[in-house]
Amino acid sequence: MSLNIIVLAKQVPDTRNVGKDAMKADGTINRAALPAIFNPEDLNALEQALRLKDLYPGSKVTVLTMGPARAAEIIREGMFRGADGGVVLSDRAFAGSDTLATSYALSAAVRKIGNFDIIIGGRQAIDGDTAQVGPQIAEKLGIPQITYAEEIISADNGEVVVKRRIESGVETVKAKMPLVVTVNNSAPDCRPRNAKALQKFKYAAVPSEVAADEAKKEFIEKRPYLSIGEWNAATVDADLAQCGLAGSPTKVKSIENVVFTAKEARRIENNDEELEALIVDLIANHTIG
Amino acid sequence: MANFYNDNDSLKHYLNHPMMEKIVDLKERNFADADKYDYAPQNFEDAMDSYDRVLEIVGDICANVIAENAEDVDHEGPVVKNGHVEYASGTARNLDACRKAGLMGMSMPRRLGGLNFPITPYIMAADMVSRADAGFENLWGLQDCAETIYEFANEEQKMKYITRVCEGETMSMDLTEPDAGSDLQSVMLKASKKEDGSWVLNGVKRFITNGDSDIHLVLARSEEGSKDGRGLSMFIYDKRNGGVTVRRIENKMGIKGSPTCELVYKDAPAELVGSTRLGLIKYVMALMNGARLGIAAQSVGISEAAYREALGYAKERMQFGKAIIEFPAVAEILSVMKAKLDASRALLYACTRFVDMYKIYDDIAKERPLTLEEKKEQKYYSRLADAFTPLAKGMTSEYCNQNAYDCIQIHGGSGFMKDYACERIYRDARITSIYEGTTQLQVVAAIRHVTTGTYLNKIREFEAQEVSPANEAIKNTLVFMTQQYADAVQAVMGVEDTKYHDFMARRLVEMAGHIIMGYLLLEDAERNEEFHKSLVVYVKYGQAEVEKHASFIGNFRPEQISDYLY
């Protein structure tokens, strides 16, 4: 049985190699100083999708991302590793989206893609670390979700079997397709880019990337596999009131630069008193607020 | 993310050598594959962009997979189970990454599933793989046995075996036997023709790198009763057919991840490659030339690793209140290491460009007759490749050993402990000047080009090139060194004693090597000022070495040779 798989991916600043200029004076991320990369856990997710494709020949892996046109870079990256193609969801109207507005826009794009069996995403992105978008998409689409996945073992007879990482070990669960699976970084690393796929897909682009270049446009038109989808709010019939800043209930009050100085771990018991004491401490030292 | 391609600008420098345009145009037959294969380049720029980006994939895998596994692989090593090899787990992961990245059969044509890369970018990949783990380079690099199948096997064999190599199957070259090491004419493994015309192999092979590979090239005696090289033929043994078992694997000093096997052939079915009797004199010679280039790449990769380990340590290690790199005695070791590394790489890629040129012409000649001009070039480059391959293998492997030695020296007492990568590098380096022909045998192959003037002619071509005023003085030094070399050649050859010639051969070949590497670095420095320091340091070093040899030869009375001979 072949599957239609959507991989949710995000282009993120590489916060793992943060230098002194990583933050701007106003406390926002200085994107120019940080290279844009494929969110690491989304690569774990892509690997799970590609393994399913190996297991069920004829399956199709589509990478979906929301971001500016240059986010097409991670779709190409996905294609170099074995994905069949992808879509960039891009619109000024999506600017300033929090996780709720993001998951609204992405779920609208998923509906537009239509025919899918599994949506796989990384657990969370290294820029926001919320781990909310995957689960919210499942809720918006009204389908089941499995989080903290380490391995998608099978997808037969309309059901997936997934091994997931939990605090005390692993558990194997079963769920009906279609569904959303979010993948942990303890899952296997993504396979490398393939030399032939790279040479085949290196000119793949979204229309706006090649708008000014007639020769490139013609080259891509002759080779449909090089064309990456570029959708906006209208394409996916998104309700603008639920998009971008307008659709984002999260309001940033202020941003503080916090430098962690404590080196030692502190252990607390699992009871209300100690938990409350911890929360009070954390508020007092501005770790949360 | 660490990347062995992006962190090493000299690879890009050689990839962008002016000669590449011609190599690529010829290799791609003016881009005839462009509409036939979706991954074929459209034009020169497109091809170069693809090499660059594929090498970046290689650099990624080298830094983040192969180098990461190197220490574990060195400790774990392969084992024999039921007559077959089980690789160390890290080796298996390395192979898996290379297969998934499509880095097998890189130089094979697209119709057989390859990437159709010229030898030059392929060897760049080998350079990086060796820096990551020299032992793994042996397994991965044996893909160039496919070159020999491509050149000499029939179409059916090419379709059957090369396609499998491109899909990731590994290869081995089964040449050495207990009594046939450097002297391959003594090979005894018996090939017998059965009544139905098929062949079977019986006997023992020893020291076979990756001896449990999927596809073996085997040198065997097909002519019963014959004693010399003319009775030997080349065969393909396919592991799928069975008949060969691994009796043991050697416990080696270095490159421990690479299984070195003793093989027992019992009625192992095999296919003849090309014609009988040409096994050693034609096919193995071609195979060995490819393998020697591979070892030169391995040597350069190890030199690179040694230099970087040494540099890193010298910057960090504090003594007497400062980093030890600030002491001139230490800094000198490092700058000479760097110069030897850069000189080695310059020679390696000069050699790959020559190999590319003649091999591509050889291949084109199978499709259509070459023009007179093309034939002339084919001959020119074929001769240069023949002259530069033993020179490159000999010089780079000796320098890699010297650099590995110096790397430990920089580490001081810590370098003698098992705690740093330098001790593995030191052990891995040691084999490079031994296998695929010892340095002494490289001299035997190279000396012809001293006496026939191939080296001197090439040096004169370099000499005829204009250089910028800033480099005039260095060029003059090289011109002076050339005169010393020419005089020494004349002095040695003027003595009618072949033993004396053999005795002095090493010195003459090295002199030629220093001058050639000096000119190559001069050419590099003219294009890229990053090479300036290495040019200066290397020519200073080479000048003293040439002087030393000139002095030895000049002060040597031929009859004194009796004091050296046993």
Image: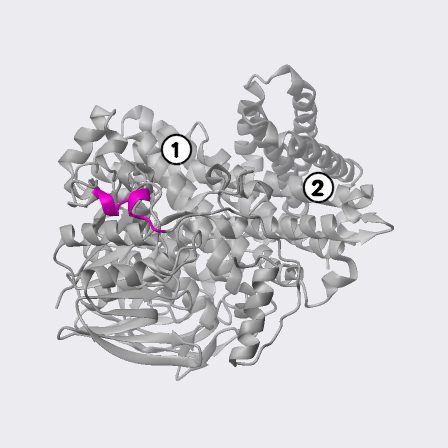
Q: Say if the magenta span includes residue B175.
A: no
Colour theme? one colour
Q: Give the number of the disc on residue B457.
A: none
Q: Main secondary structure of the magenta part?
A: helix
Residue B540 relative to residue B247: left or right: right
Residue A201 in view (yes/no): yes
Give yes or no for contact between labels 1 and 2 (Cβ–Cβ under 8 Å): no
Residue B228: x and y, percent?
A: 43, 61
Frontmost residue, B528 versus B402: B528
Instruction: Name the residue located 68 percent from the left edge and 21 percent from the top edge.
Output: B476
Is label 1 in a helix, a strand or a loop?
helix
Q: Earlier in the sequence, mark 1 or mark 2?
A: 2
Q: Which span of residues is magenta-colored? A: A240-249
Residue beneath disc 1? B379
Give how far across and how far down residue B244 sits, in percent. Answer: 35, 76
Secondary structure, mark 2, is: helix
Which residue type does callout 1 highlight? Lys
B520 sits left or right of A170 in the view = right
The one of B88 and B233 positioned closer to us in this rendering: B88
Q: Is residue B387 above or below residue A286?
A: above
Write down the residue under mark 2. Answer: B336
